[in-house]
Amino acid sequence: MVDYTVAGVEGGLCAPRGFRAAGVDAGLVQGPGPDLGLVVSQQTSMAAGRFTSHPFASAPVRWSRAQLRTGMARAVLVHAGSANAATGPEGDADVAALAARCAAAIGCVAGEVLVCGTGAIGVRLAVADAAEAADKATAALGRRGSGEVARAMTASGGIAREHAVAVAWSEGEVRIGGAAKASVPFAPAFDHPDDRSAGGLGSRPPDPPSATTLVVLTTDATVEAGVLDGLLGRAVARSFERVMVDQAPGMADAAVLLANATAAAPTLRPDSDGAAAFESALTQLCESLAEGLALRVPGARKLVVVTVHGAADHTDALAAARAVAGSVALRAALAAGLPSWPAVLDALATAGVALHPGRVGVSFGPVTVVADGRSAPHDERAAASVAAKSQVDLAVDLGIGPAAATVTTTDLPPEALGRHAGVD
């Protein structure tokens, strides 16, 4: 066991050493406030990313995915107003021009600028306005700009959260900062080119592509080449991909991590104490960001934690947990304080997993409501009391094998169903 501590710190994306940020009003979205954000490292950094598996991935996703083949980056630019998705070759040209303009202002090459877009689908970005704003953002960079970046992420709608932590172990300390944005509803499911990036969790189930989720992460850690990608992949698999508020396709999802090696700490190498401590802290940070987004869903009153165990393998466990967490009937019932176990069984029937109906069990908190596939004698008031809590813990036992998975969602407020079509 690695002995380490993790503590929250101020500063968000700028909490790690050597990062500055700014947000400016580029006129990309009507109304006051920043709609373009920029995060810059003082030096070229190791970088990794995870992106939507949507076949119509946005131009910023295609650009950033291609640039990260080098494993290096200097900056992340986030713009609202247009997701720059379904815009054809012109959209690709726009993102390349924007990256080049931003790189010239920073003093790096265009391939070191990652771009994330959010907003209208099928509408080209006002690239001239965005490019001019990139110059302004570069001039405004500072240690207190993280909050402005988070605000820019939500200029086209959605919810955002920022957080930062310091992780210390016997040989050193590093900091990790992050900001995340999601549209409502959301159900992030990032593309993992190598299943091992999920930390031996098994193959991903055939879920629909993710809804709009943008995640920008920074750290001052020094990371050995080839290690950062796996750290990010495992962290998002265990956090953002375990939180869903309905299913909806997204073309612009991105999660990127920059590590600029400015902390006075040893290099993080595979199987080292520092790498283990860092991965735990990164996962905790991502969990905090993801759960914070769920709690900020308009009208949501309850966090619902669905744990499926007894599955044949992890793929089945995760698919079953996502099916239950995505059940409209269940979440609407929980919004009314009703522990609807029939809705749980209905959801399992759609999950496409190995089932032995006579072995299934369901519990709301400590109250078992289904045993051996049928209604179990229980105290209905006690079950209703669990369903009325601000956090509802729901456990499902498939009774087949050793695998388990947990997915977090919310109750289903009517406001969460109002996602505007054509906005990502």
Image (cartoon, rainbow, N blue to C red):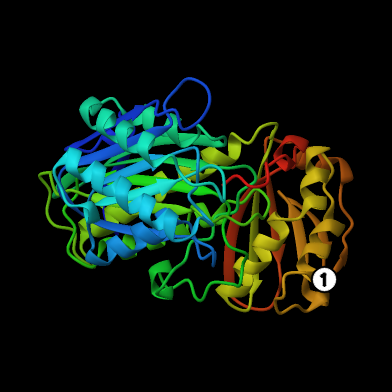
Q: Nearer the viewer, residue 313 or 61?
A: 61
- Image-based side of 81 in relation to 271, left or right: right
Q: Is residue 102 visible?
A: yes
Q: Nearer the viewer, residue 342 or 253?
A: 253
Q: Quadrant of residue 193?
A: bottom left
- Image-based side of 254 in relation to 143, left or right: right
Residue 363: horizontal and vertical position, in percent?
75, 55
Residue type for callout 1: Asp
- Image-based side of 302 in relation to 251, left or right: right
Residue beneath the point at 32% across and 53% down: 96
Residue beneath the point at 59% across and 36% down: 295
- Image-based side of 235 in relation to 203, left or right: left
Question: Which image quarter is the N terminus in?
Answer: bottom left
Residue 420: horizontal and vertical position, in percent?
67, 41
Residue holding disc 1:
372
Residue beneath the point at 60% across and 53% down: 187
